[in-house]
Amino acid sequence: MDRINALRAHATPIVIGAAVVVLTAIALVWWLTDTPLGIDSAVYRAGGSAVIHGEPLYAHLTALPGWVPDLPFTYPPFAALLFVTLTALPTQVSWCLLAIAAAPSLYVALRPFTERAYVPFLLLGAFALQPVWQTIGLGQVNLVLMAVVIADVLLLRGSRFSGIGIGIASAVKLIPLIFIVHLLLVRRTADAVRALAAFLGSTALAFAVLPKDSLRYWTSAIFNDHFAEMKGWVGNQSWQGFIARTLPEGRTATVLIGCFGVLCAAVMMWLVRRLHRAGDDRAALLVTAGCALLVSPISWTHHWVWVVPALGYLCTRAKRAVVPIVAVLFTGWTVAVVPGGGGTERTWNLGQALVGNAYLISGSVLICALARGLSDSDSEKPVTTPVSGG
């Protein structure tokens, strides 16, 4: 019995340690055998190499390995400054740095959202979710950025450093800017100011070091035309992806995209404020993250890593029966079983459309469920009549 209790107490470090060991071993074997690994981390490394050699950052990356498609660097210049550190290592080993950060990042993301007893099981199960294993396989930064945001909003609340992490994360990838709005909505003005200052400071540093690349990014490369033709691909689980799969380009599609964006922003602001007043800042943060995924022009399936803390939250809200259902939806099968690529998404029937848009639909349903749960709890509050003093 003592051994069982000790194992339970150390289950989380064991899972994290095992993940780090396994991923490190994979990186070393793939490096020694010169096996391709980490398409996105290879692009990050090539961007860092462009900085070192004074090459244009938003043109063809000469340091890309031959097995990587000719992908562009799409992040802000400040990100390229950080990725310079990857150039000191072989491509597969630079992937290793991002891969071994996955388990600690997942722990940081889960810990504020669930009870300690659930953490090791959710942590282990998270590696079966497509957003997680795809992020690891590509060598993406999604898990790290999510952990930074969660730590900033929930773990560093009240600290004089709160907000700085969100600002830096926003300078690496623009989507976290929405969490500055989140800080304002929950009346953490000082934290929002620090976040904005960190973002502007990081961006200014990039302008000072990479003036030409910064000018090109903020005037043209930011629009990311490379992925414009891929918006309708099944791997893009955003509202714009849904519209691109469903309707031809034109005024109707544009109006629907704009109206949904305004509606989603309005619902997010209302719901975040209400949840904050109800003392549920965890749910409020999930709503903001969900809104970002829905309204972003591109929300690849590996961007949906926020499903991990959402599952942790469901466990603590006595919704454990829902957890396996949501988890199964995010294992990747929904994207794999429907026709995808080359515009075949436009031929989907109703059943295929429901399956192929499962991430988008699930995210919308979860946000609606939070809104309904909040309304139900409000309706159950007893109404008190003030006592007259006369």
Image (cartoon, rainbow, N blue to C red):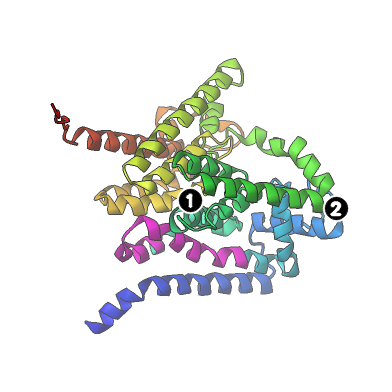
In this picture, which residue range is highlighted in magenta? 97-123
**In the rendered image, which quarter is residue 382 located in?**
top left
Above/below status of 379 relative to 191: above
- Name the outermost residue toward the bottom: 2
Left or right, residue 75 beside residue 384: right
Q: Is-magenta flag for residue 98?
A: yes
The amino acid on which the numbered mark 2 sits, given as a three-letter code, is Glu
Q: Earlier in the sequence, mark 1 or mark 2?
A: 2
Mark 1, Cα crowd under 10 Å, few <14 / some 14-19 / many 20+, is many
Examine the rendering and report whether any part of residue 220 can be seen: no
Numbered disc 2: secondary structure? loop
Above/below status of 252 relative to 232: above
Q: Position of residue 383 (x, y in %)?
A: 17, 32
Seen from the viewer's position, the closer of residues 195 and 122 is 195
For the C terminus, the image quarter is top left
Q: Which residue is mark 1?
A: 305
The amino acid on which the numbered mark 1 sits, given as a three-letter code, is Val
User: Which residue is located at x 69 percent, y 53 percent?
Assistant: 79
Mark 2, Cα crowd under 10 Å, few <14 / some 14-19 / many 20+, is some
Say the numbered circle drawn on residue 55.
2
**In the rendered image, which quarter is residue 235 located in?**
top right
Q: Main secondary structure of the magenta part?
A: helix
Q: Position of residue 292 (x, y in %)?
A: 51, 39
Above/below status of 311 relative to 241: below
Above/below status of 90 relative to 343: below
Q: Position of residue 256 (x, y in %)?
A: 52, 21
Seen from the viewer's position, the closer of residues 186 and 40 is 186
Q: State the separation of the CA atoms marked 1 and 2.
A: 33 Å
Examine the rendering and report whether any part of residue 106 can be seen: yes
Q: Position of residue 221 (x, y in %)?
A: 74, 39
Numbered disc 1: secondary structure? helix
Q: Is-magenta flag for residue 61?
A: no
